[in-house]
Amino acid sequence: MTDSLTPLAAGSLAGKTALVTGSSRGIGADTVRYFAQAGANVVINFRNKAPRAEKLAAQLRELGVQVLVVGADLTDEASVQAMFSEVEQTFGSLDILVLNASGGMEGGMAADYALQLNRDAQVRVLETALPLLGSGARVVFVTSHQAHFIHTTPTMPEYEPVALSKRAGEDALRERIPALSKRGVEFVVVSGDMIEGTITATLLERANPGAIALRREDAGKLYNVSEFAAEVALAAVEPVPADNTRLVGETSSFVAE
């Protein structure tokens, strides 16, 4: 397992710019921190937690890198366009784009919110970012085993709508691999098991008490937020696997397609 504190060599991303969606907390925050530790200028994206994003930005600026904080609702086209306009004005281009933000278990949202965020918004963010992604750039899509393997391995009912929407997002992004390759842009999916300490795990546990402990028992171990974020950060720099998929953690209880 990776050293989750410093997965990337110091200075290895100097001169590069990385944007991580949903990076004011959790996996996204740790991923963007690892990029900054490696010398990258970074873009912290958040939806509605500006103070938390600004606090993280202040910490990362102490590392000597440039940090841009941009609030954006990824389900809103104009909001996404404004975010990348700001990125272009500040940095001119983008070397790493991590599609980390997801959701769908929140209460009070439209019936199709999971699809809007986990499929439509992911594609929109990628397509809006494309003019900034030059040859050698890398796009990373973050998902879960429960979503990646949903067509062959059932998941708990409470998570199924989210899993299906995230798999739909993954499929829609994979369709763009040939076009990305023509531009010299690489694409990789990072799929992990349930991650201890995430919002999704907390909501699942609330809906289905004991679910996390049961999964931990089956898997032998579940990654925590910083450990999984280290794998996401590495996926942005290590060679892309032949099937464009980096599987993190135990997969023997999932059936491949």
Image (cartoon, helix red, strand yellow):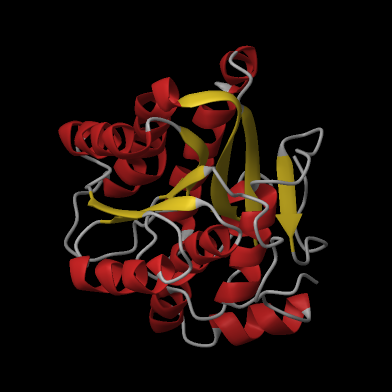
Q: Position of residue 212 (x, y in %)?
A: 57, 81
Looking at this view, name the residue that lies furthest to the front: 64
In this view of the protein, can residue 193 be seen by the observer? no
Q: Position of residue 157 (x, y in %)?
A: 47, 63
Q: Is residue 5 above or below residue 97?
A: below
> What residue is drawn where x is 59% and y is 28%?
174
Image quadrant in which the N terminus is located: bottom right
Q: Nearer the viewer, residue 32 or 171?
A: 32
Image quadrant where residue 102 sits: bottom left
> What residue is drawn where x is 25% and y is 41%?
75
> What residue is drawn where x is 62% and y is 56%?
233
In this view of the protein, can residue 10 be seen by the observer? yes
Is 103 on the left or on the right of 250, as rendered? left
Q: Position of residue 90 (x, y in %)?
A: 30, 39
Q: Nearer the viewer, residue 23 or 156?
A: 23
Q: Is residue 119 above or below residue 180?
A: below
Image quadrant where residue 218 sits: bottom right
Q: Nearer the viewer, residue 224 or 186?
A: 186
Image quadrant where residue 222 sits: bottom right
> What residue is drawn where x is 47% and y is 86%?
209
Image quadrant in which the C terminus is located: top right
**Total of numbered circles in the picture?**
0
Is 180 on the left or on the right of 161, as rendered? right
Q: Position of residue 193 (x, y in %)?
A: 65, 65
